[in-house]
Image (spheres, helix red, strand yellow):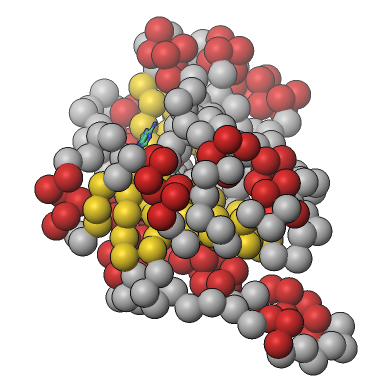
């Protein structure tokens, strides 16, 4: 009897692939190329993706044998979960695999932005020794606003508290007592915008969060705020942020995620005080190893008809 087929549509850790190969035929494809993905889905019993593959209703309809879609990471915004559920396809993710890496990436962007690390580096390697031009700011005694106090938001808050900052958060789904336990004061979105010297975004991409930080919100911020988004592109409007930076209302930004990905152009590119990375929040050896092995285990359970617990 032929083995079930697991289609791996994006890079997966060797440890994850090795686990899958114990029981399944593992095939790979480029999930961002529809002309490869759709035909490859015809024989797939399981599909494994990261964030570049759009698992929409068309993809699900192209996969008559599909039993499980596994997202090797946190966000499920690239998977049409209702369409999958309607087709009887289970959707699983690896919700804790990369949270430490994502939190560390947000803090990296925040600190590097506060100290002008990227433009100072670029200037120096291009022959300019400029010290006063790249004077930065300390975190100590500043106010940091965390948008979304979930798994990653909490890790960021816990780590930043060691810098001696005041911590605010906006998250209507979190109890004030839970936030207080980790030294965070829950506030309204407007209060967070008005009081924060740094804002860091850790929200899922949903219809409510898309464009949550747009032109109107960026007019309410404290002068010289610095904004980090290592959650999802589009939650902070790139055009509006670029305008706020050009007009001096926002001092700088650290951006890991973009409304359209992959991208090589954004209104934010070319602004000296904006540090950008190509969606690297989860790109550590540790996170990829965990994501790969967690989804491989979930696929094994799902294809043998067993209960798949939260990873
Ligand atoms: P989580 O679900 O644990 O936390 C999200 C929090 O946002 C929750 O506490 C929830 O109550 C809150 N929230 C939801 N809707 C809200 C709204 N409308 N207003 C205010 N708060 C709201 O998720 P997480 O694991 O902390 O991940 C956060 C984000 O980071 C996700 O978008 C995820 O996809 C992204 N992420 C990015 C990378 C990367 O590579 N850059 C890596 C991992 C995760
Ligand atoms: C996630 O949501 O897990 C991240 O964006 C990381 C990824 O896309 O791999």
Which residue is depicted at the point 69% across and 73% down? 118
Q: Quadrant of the C terminus?
A: top left
Asked whether, in this view, residue 149 is left or right of residue 139, the answer is left
214 shown above or below 4: below
Q: How many marks?
A: 0
Residue 17 in view, yes or no: no
- Which residue is at the front of the view, 214 or 223? 223
**3 and 183: which is toward the camera:** 183
201 to 128, vertically: above or below = above
Where is residue 168 shown, x and y percent of the image?
A: 32, 54
Q: Residue at x 43, y 20 (%)?
A: 81
Q: Position of residue 29 (x, y in %)?
A: 65, 36
Percent of width and height locating residue 308: 25, 32
Q: Position of residue 20 (x, y in %)?
A: 42, 43
Q: Residue at x 48, y 23 (%)?
A: 207
Q: Looking at the picture, does residue 124 appear above or below residue 153?
A: below
For the residue pair 103 and 302, the one nearer the viewer reads as 103
Q: Quadrant of residue 269?
A: bottom right
Q: Is residue 270 above or below residue 217?
A: below
Locate residue 69 relative to residue 228 in the image: left or right: left
Residue positioned 52% across, 44% down in the render: 220
| Quarter that holds the N terminus | top left
Residue 290 in which image quadrant: bottom left
């Amino acid at each position: 009897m032929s083995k079930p087929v697991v289609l791996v549509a994006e890079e997966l850790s060797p440890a994850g692939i090795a686990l899958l190969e114990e029981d399944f035929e593992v095939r790979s494809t480029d999930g961002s190329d529809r002309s490869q993905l759709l035909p490859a889905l015809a024989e797939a019993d399981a599909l494994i993706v990261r964030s570049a593959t759009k698992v929409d209703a068309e993809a699900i309809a192209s996969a008559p044998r599909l039993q499980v879609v596994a997202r090797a990471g946190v966000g499920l915004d690239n998977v049409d979960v209702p369409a999958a559920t309607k087709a009887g396809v289970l959707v699983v993710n690896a919700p804790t695999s990369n949270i430490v890496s994502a939190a560390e990436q947000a803090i990296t962007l925040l600190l590097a932005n506060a100290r002008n690390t990227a433009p100072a580096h670029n200037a120096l390697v291009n022959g300019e020794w400029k010290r006063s031009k790249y004077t930065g700011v300390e975190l100590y005694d500043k106010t940091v606003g965390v948008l979304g106090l979930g798994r990653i938001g909490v890790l960021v808050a816990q780590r930043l508290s060691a810098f001696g900052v005041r911590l605010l958060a906006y998250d209507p789904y979190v109890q004030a007592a839970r936030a207080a336990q980790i030294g965070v004061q829950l506030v309204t979105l407007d209060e967070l915008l008005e009081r924060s010297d740094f804002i860091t975004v850790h929200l899922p991409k949903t219809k409510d969060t898309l464009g949550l930080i747009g032109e109107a919100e960026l007019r309410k911020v404290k002068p010289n705020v610095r904004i980090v988004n290592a959650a999802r592109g589009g939650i902070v409007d790139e055009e509006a942020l670029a305008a706020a930076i050009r007009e001096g209302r926002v001092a700088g930004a650290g951006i890991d995620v973009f409304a359209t990905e992959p991208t090589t152009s954004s209104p934010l590119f070319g602004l000296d005080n904006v540090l950008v990375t190509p969606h690297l929040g989860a790109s550590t050896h540790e996170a990829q190893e965990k994501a790969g092995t967690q989804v491989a285990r979930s696929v094994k359970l799902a294809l043998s008809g067993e209960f798949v617990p939260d990873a």
